[in-house]
Amino acid sequence: MNYTIYFGFGIINNIGNKKVKKGAVYLVGAGSGDPELLTLKAYRVMQQADVVLYDSLVSQDVLEMCAESATKIFVGKRRDNHALPQQDINQLLVTHAQAGKCVVRLKGGDPFIFGRGGEELQTVAENDIFFESIPGITAASAAASSTGIPLTHREYAQSVKFVTAYKKTNAPNEDFKEMLDPSQTVVLYMGLHRLKDLTQGLIQAGRDRETPFALVSQASLPSQQVLIGTLDDIAAKQAVANLPTPALLIMGDVVNLHKQLCDYNLVNLGIQQRFTEQEKNVVLAI
């Protein structure tokens, strides 16, 4: 009789009297780039990795927290520049896991929020490979916290919607009528290069042109920049400011709270609390 025992970061198959180690895939959210926002569970798995497949949004600080002995393979994507097609990334996961490796698929943000994590795990499961998914802090949460723009607020927003600016095969998302509720915060991922088209489309669809709008570049990192405007003028302001990617767009009345809170926000003032090296070593030893 065959049965499977979960064993550390691998899987042991008992086949008769023979034990055969199988690999497994760990889908890990690397968060927004600040290594202190990485979960302890993510760090523990990363330290056990034999192979790490990582994206372009994984910061160098986070990547360095993986096991030194791990083979690290860059598979990142930026707009039309893909290191590998998605199907090749899926196959790499399968190939290394079938070779008995502990495979960490390290993705920026949270793998299940516009991260193609579900697609990759479908391929993994279709090949009879076990997996675990470990969440990360998505860009919307990181940007909201670091800028003092709450995504919900009892006075201003009773719901929040996450929207991608692009659909499959890079088709632009033009479902503007789904983003017109003034009591809802809308967070647009991957929208910086479509900013003018998005804002014009929303105004034409009926959204108030004076709706508060924020652009947050490199959220939670020391290089974070914030641009505040309205649906009507944010594209023109960005044409002058030219804030870099990765960037997130936040639309709704909650954006007005940034002005009220920014003078007391330690992140905005650049003096937020950080671990000392001694404290960091204690945490990483857990």
Image (cartoon, rainbow, N blue to C red):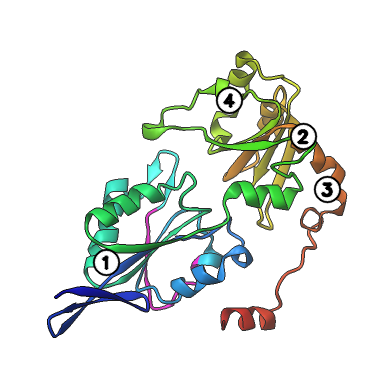
Specify the quadrant that holds the N terminus.
Answer: bottom left
Question: Mark 3 touching mark 1, by CB under 8 A?
Answer: no
Mark 4 or mark 1, whichever is nearer to me: 1
Labels 2 and 3: the sequence-earlier one: 2
- In the rendering, at what x and y percent does residue 252 appear? 71, 32
Mark 2 or mark 3, whichever is nearer to me: 2
Q: Which residue is mark 4?
A: 198
Residue type for callout 4: Leu
- In the rendering, at what x and y percent does residue 101 appear? 29, 72
Residue stretch rendered in magenta on the structure: 63-75
- In the rendering, at what x and y percent does residue 244 appear? 61, 43
Kindly identify which numbered label has been placed on residue 97: 1
Mark 1 or mark 2, whichever is nearer to me: 2
Q: CA distance from mark 2 to mark 3?
A: 18 Å
Question: Mark 1 touching mark 2, by CB under 8 A?
Answer: no
In percent of the image, x 58 and y 25: which residue is there? 198
Kindly identify which numbered label has been placed on residue 156: 2
Question: Mark 3 touching mark 4, by CB under 8 A?
Answer: no
